[in-house]
Image (spheres, helix red, strand yellow):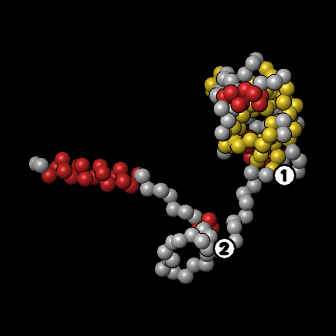
Amino acid sequence: MKEIPFLCLLLASLLGACSQQKPAIPSQALTITDSITPPAETETISSEPAPQETLLVLSVNGNKLNVCWEDNETVKELLSYTQTESIVVNATRYGGFEQVGSLPQGFTRSDVQLTTEPGDIVLYSGDQLVLFFGSNSWSYTKLGHIEGLSQDALSELLGGSSAVIEIHLN
């Protein structure tokens, strides 16, 4: 009978150890300076950097911001649009917690009721871009979140009467 609790404890520790493993590094990310044991099979490791992924960049009043973009249809449409031209939105402060402005066209909506946080980027009504430096509850399509800025820094950047927001390719 004493073996059953011991086996359960052993099984729990093995499962816990498995869940904490880090993902493998993709082979195209390896460089000649990485120290790894070569694979059993012959594999070519390129010393050239992998091509840079196409990314959307968000700038506010000329300040490039770090954004974690959502993986949804609307963001894919923004990416497609910026293949030919940048999106420039002349936004104005609204309600003391956001900058909002018209996009050059309507985009796909997948609105859900949510409470925004400072730094959230959303689509409102299909054709309005909204950047939050405060909070609000409404039905939006979330596009992304500005990272690396405190609420005070966001308020300073977005709290003026207007802002020029640009979305373009990296």
Is residue 35 found left or right of 112 in the rendered image? left
Q: Which residue in the rendered view is the most extreme toward the left?
A: 1
Q: Secondary structure at mark 1?
A: loop
Q: State yes or no: discs 2 and 1 in contact (Cβ < 8 Å).
A: no
Disc marking residue 83: 1
Residue designated by label 2: 47
Which residue is at a point 80% across and 40% down the rendered structure image?
63
Callout in the foreground (2, 1): 2
Which residue is at a point 89% across and 47% down the rendered structure image?
85
Q: Which residue in the rendered view is the most extreme toward the bottom?
A: 42
Is residue 85 found left or right of 71 in the rendered image? right
For residue 25, what is the image quadrant? bottom right
Specify few, some or many for label 1: CA neighbours under 10 Å numbering under 14, 14-19, or 20 or more.
Answer: few
Q: In the image, is residue 101 above or below residue 29?
A: above
Give whichever of discs 2 and 1 has the lower sequence position: 2
The kind of residue on which mark 2 rests is: Ser
